[in-house]
Amino acid sequence: MASESLKEEILRLKRERHAVILAHSYQRPEIQDIADFVGDSLALARQAQAAECDVIVFCGVHFMAETACILNPARTVLLPDLEAACSLEQSCPAEELEKFLEENRERNFYVVAYVNCSIGVKALADVIVTSGNSRRIIETAPESRPILFVPDKNLGAWTAAQTGREMVLWDGACHVHRRFTAEQVRQARAAHPQAQVVCHPECGPEVRALADHVCSTEKMIGYCRESACGSFIIVTETGILHRLRALVPGKEFIPVAGGAASCTECGYMKLNTLEKLRDCLRDMAPVVKLDEALRLRAEKPLLRMLELSK
């Protein structure tokens, strides 16, 4: 089927299903282009709550669609490919976290969970954070309790440095961001000496130390738009480049490591395609379904995050 006719069919099905299409900034360009809203985890969580629709199609990975389902129990939430997982989510199984908390019950940890985690981990958390609001939310954490930050040790370490709060860090990391190296950044800067380096806080400390600015994908857009610099080396998943080029025209965006897919792409994110998007709207499947008791437990720290992020 020709691409244009495929897009037309998706738009027709979207209208018939009274659906809204949400896409993460790491999705394929053609999916970003057809989505109603594109953004990071926090922006899309808010859009999922605010959207007037019967059906939410979440073009992202499984935990994102799960989060939309937690916040929108009366709506049908679809994920084009159920195999779209997340290495960061997988690094912190809920049963292992529960065992750790039980073994350290006397420490009474205040559990801060990065949104890139399963519903089971969210249900064990006191509050959820994203890369865009982690600093603000950590600053509200009670001084009387030690903080356990799960699952991303890199975001946790960056947030600890930003806030001055000591934390116990779970040993998890994103498989894409942990592949970026300081040498790649040095090579990119040598090839493009006029460019600023902008990186995601999920990158390791040696990479963050070489960056001109560290921020979430959503904040990258504002930073690059407002900066007097005309070119930027972007150290995160390459899907964001499409959005940056669309929203900040006239500036140059350079992927670190030359944009090699083996280094800079998330294969899970790229599992979603226009064909799968069309099929899930046509068939109303796969549907994300949650245990209601677990959903209610996971909803509390998510709502706390949204309240603190206002």
Image: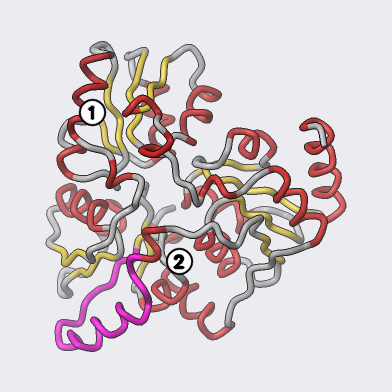
Q: Quadrant of residue 197?
A: top left
Toward the front, the furthest residue is 262
Instruction: Give the quarter of the figure containing the N terminus.
Output: top right
100 up-or-down from 282: above or below: below
Residue type at mark 1 is Val
Residue nearest the observer in this picture, 307 or 126: 126
Residue at point 71% right, 66% down? 76
Q: Quadrant of residue 254?
A: top left
- Which residues lie in the magenta part? 91-113
Name which of mark 2 and mark 1 comes first in the sequence: 1
User: Which label is found at residue 302?
Assistant: 2
Residue type at mark 2 is Leu
Q: Position of residue 145 (x, y in %)?
A: 17, 75
Residue nearest the observer in this picture, 302 or 81: 81
Residue at point 26% right, 21% down? 188
Q: Are marks 2 and 1 in contact (CB under 8 Å)?
A: no
Residue at point 58% right, 82% down? 291
